[in-house]
Structure formats: structure tokens, C-alpha cells
Amino acid sequence: MINVAILGLGTVGSGVAEVIEQNQNEIKKALGDNLHVKYILDIRDIPGVVNDINIIVNDPDIKVICETMGGKEPAYTYTHLALERGISVCTSNKELVDAYGVELSAIAREHHCSYLFEASVGGGIPLLRTIREACGQEKISQIAGILNGTCNYILTNMKAGKDFATALKEAQEKGFAERNPAADVEGHDTARKIAILASLVSGKKFSYEQVECEGITNITPEDFAQAEAKGMSIKLLGVYNAENSSVIVAPFLVKNSHPLYNVNDVFNGVMLHGNMVDNLMFYGRGAGKLPTASAVVSDVIECAKNIGKNINNKFADLAPANVNKFPAKNPGEKFRTL
């Protein structure tokens, strides 16, 4: 039996516990052993939940930790401490990966454990491991992705004729958008995700602060009407171009012949272009309790198969990227075209 701990009993953390409990048979087939959640840590006073990280990291039975707290602190401190003790950490925390992923990956390698973050981009879509392993032989020249389900839901409703405020309110009522939706609608969430993807495929560290970022708050129903008249729709995309080492988050016009055109509601879609494999399309639920938790557990299984070893996540040796400006919009046009 492999004992694990979960840090943070929020949406994703509770989902991880549920996935492990309900899919134990499938996990045993994949791992050859059972997973057991020995500890759950949370800052709140909840029966059966611990509050002291030292209880977890000082227990020699704990082999893998799931960090689902979000934010930089105390997630950074707890992750750093665990990796120094040789305990692998799997996370859904894109903010932490963007800010400290290189440092934490190097610590994991030094201490013969792993730092994996499949769930940080694309929710339940098996994206990062596919790029890292199945596409390791490829030169990826471009990534274009719908990476934020909240924005995609809002834009889908605006395409149907609603204005931004109405679509946002509906998204909040359904739990798809936070009370303060700025991180989503201003593009910051997408920027962290495209920075992680660009870093993975380029071999250079792109950071969130380097991403040219424009959100969706200035889009109107009239913009959608004009786009539809041209056989297009409007999508908030994160785009990385290898040719000029540029990365952007912005609303783009997407032609109805493009696979991303039909990615609607809370779904995510990511298209990669490789020099040999050509175009690859990934589609699925980019957020949500169980899809994201499933991705975390997939990393847990990978780490549990490699206890005492380091899985190369391709982040430990990244030097900072030199980022150039993304090609400008055409004069007089409100949006770029993919």
C-alpha cells in the first residue's frame, strides 16, 4: 500500500480523495498496489484533518503528497519541505508552478523524488505528459489553446446574444466564475497556463509576467455578430510561437474550419503543431473537481511507480526565456486572426 497525503481540502483536494476512493480498482491495475490517503491537511479546524505539515513530512510512510491548496503560500513552503525530505509532490497549483516550478523541480531531482503538475494546465486533459513523453521527439512550433473554461463559457453565451455582464452573472450563479472573476476574465489564469506550456516545449522558462495579456471585458455582442458574418467566432486564446519566441493571451478570431471553433461552454481545447506530427488537438474538461483531481491522481500513480527516483519534468534546468513581442494586430482591426 502506498500512503499519500492531501494538502488542502477544497474543491480539488476533496476530489482527489474521491477519485482514490472510488477508482481504487483501476488505480491498483495501473499501479500494481493500492493508494491510501493517510492524512489530509487544512488550515481549517475539521474533524480528522491535521493542521501541522510536520506530522506529514516526518512520517516515513508518506511517499507522495498532493498539493491542492492554490496560491503561493503556504503551498511553496510545504512543497519545499516535502521535496527536501524526498517526498514527491503532485500539484494542480499553476501559480506555484509558474513562480517556483524551476526551483522546486531542481530540489526534487536533488533529493531523488519528483515534482509533477499535470493538473495545472488543462484540468483533466492529459496534456503535459503527452507533450513531455509522446512528443519528446518533436519540434513544437506553435501552441494555441482555449485554457480557461470560465471565459469560454462567457464567450459562448455572448455568441448567443448576451452581453458580457449578463453572461458573467450567469457563470457566477452556476459556479463557473468566482465572485471576483478578474484572474479569469482579464486573462491572467490563461497567461500562467500558456507560460507553463511554452516553457515545457521550448526548453526556456517563460513566466506569467512575460505574457502579453488582454482579457475579454471589452468584447461586445456586436463583435460576435461581425465575426459570424465572416464565418468566424471569438475565443480567448493563449498562443505561443516558437519562430519569434513570443507568447500572448488575447481574444482571437477563429475560422469555422478550425478545430478550436467548436470548443464551447466550459471545455478547453489545445492545438499543437509539430514539425513531423503536424497538428495535434486536445479537448476536454479544463477544470472542475473530478477532472482536475483525476489528473492529480495520474501524477500520484506515476510518482508511486518511481519512489526513490526523479521523473524528469523538463523544468529543473530551464534558463529564462528571451521573449519578443507577438505580431501586432492589423491596422484598424480589433482582433487578431488565428
Image (cartoon, rainbow, N blue to C red):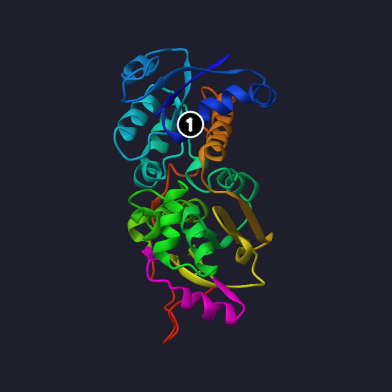
Give the image location of residue 185, x and y in percent.
Answer: 39, 59
Are there few (<14), some (14-19), or many (20+) residues within 10 Å of tag 1? many
Q: Amino acid at mark 1?
A: Ser
Residue 297, by quadrant, is: top right
How many numbered callouts? 1
Which residue corresponds to mark 1?
Answer: 114
Looking at the image, which is closer to me, 193 or 157? 157
Give the image location of residue 151, x and y in percent.
Answer: 46, 58
Q: Secondary structure at mark 1?
A: loop
Q: Residue at 37% x, 14% y: name it.
A: 58
Q: Which residues are magenta?
A: 212-233
Quadrant that contains the C terminus: bottom right
Give the image location of residue 272, x and y in percent.
Answer: 60, 59
Residue 92 appears in the figure: yes
Quadrant that contains the N terminus: top right
Looking at the image, which is closer to me, 125 or 272? 125
Q: Residue at 42% x, 65% y: name it.
A: 164
| Residue 125: in magenta span | no
Give the image location of residue 203, x and y in percent.
Answer: 48, 53
| Residue 222: in magenta span | yes
Looking at the image, which is closer to me, 336 or 135? 336
